[in-house]
Image: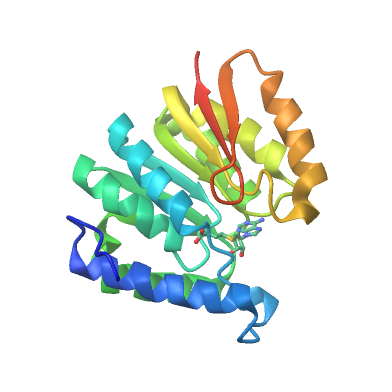
Amino acid sequence: MKIRRKNMKTSIFNVLEKLEKQSSLEKSRKVDVPPNERMLAITKETGEILNMLIRLKNAKNMLEVGMSVGYSTIWCAEAIIENDGKIITIEQNSEKIKRAKENFQDANISDIITIQEGLAIQILRNLSLDEKYKNFFDFVLIDADKENVIEYFDMILPLVSIGGVIITDNMLYPEKYREEMKKFSSHIKSNQNVRTITSPIGNGEEITIKLR
Ligand SMILES: C[S@@+](CC[C@H](N)C(=O)[O-])C[C@H]1O[C@@H](n2cnc3c(N)ncnc32)[C@H](O)[C@@H]1O
């Protein structure tokens, strides 16, 4: 029996459901999607947790690094919208941005999302130079390329408010990222300004809180 997500707007529910179907086809390899068109989305379970954490924290200003076609963004937006918040999300692939914009329109959440197109490192550098964004974000999702994950984290931390939360995807899966994510894990665990845990949810989610 299909259980409807309670209290979720139909427009958002429908887009999430459509993307979940696409994602499971992609993962099952029943369709042959070229690598640069793959959604590579977080799991539904991770989407639910992100949504719940945003609600618990009453987060208003969110930053996402690695939007793809917007599945994770929509899960977060569903909660952020209720807190009267906004999302800045970064993506370099213009075709995915086009698909994400359509998804945001269909979900009726475009108003609260600003897409920054380009290389994450460059965009984060620009945000860091703007005083407005110092200690600004209370919720962050890092889910882009893994080679630069340490650099992203270090650039993002000063932009996060005290008590703000940073989630990093793919801590445990796929296995090809294990070595990089282990280095990332030791890097953040040695930082006295954060408290962090690796949770087995989805592909392994690092949940980090900025303490000071
Ligand atoms: C794992 S996918 C993101 C999935 C998305 N968070 C979701 O769950 O729906 C990673 C995305 O990051 C983008 N990306 C990879 N490296 C990037 C970079 N250096 N700058 C900006 N975007 C990047 C890719 O194009 C890809 O769409």
In the rendered image, which quarter is residue 144 located in?
Answer: bottom right
Is residue 54 depicted above or below 134 in this figure? below
Q: Position of residue 147 (x, y in %)?
A: 76, 48
**Residue at 77% from the left image edge and 53% from the top image edge:** 175
Task: Indicate the quadrant containing the N terminus: top left, top right, bottom left or bottom right.
Answer: bottom left
Total numbered badges shown on the rendered structure: 0
**Residue at 28% from the left image edge and 74% from the top image edge:** 106
The quadrant of the rendered image in which ligand 1 is seen is: bottom right
Q: Is residue 52 left or right of residue 197?
A: left
Q: Is residue 198 left or right of residue 2?
A: right
In the rendered image, which quarter is residue 80 located in?
Answer: top left
Residue 51 seen: yes
**Residue at 56% from the left image edge and 28% from the top image edge:** 157
Q: Residue furthest right?
A: 179
Residue 114 seen: no
Q: Residue furthest bottom?
A: 31
Q: Position of residue 164 (x, y in %)?
A: 43, 27
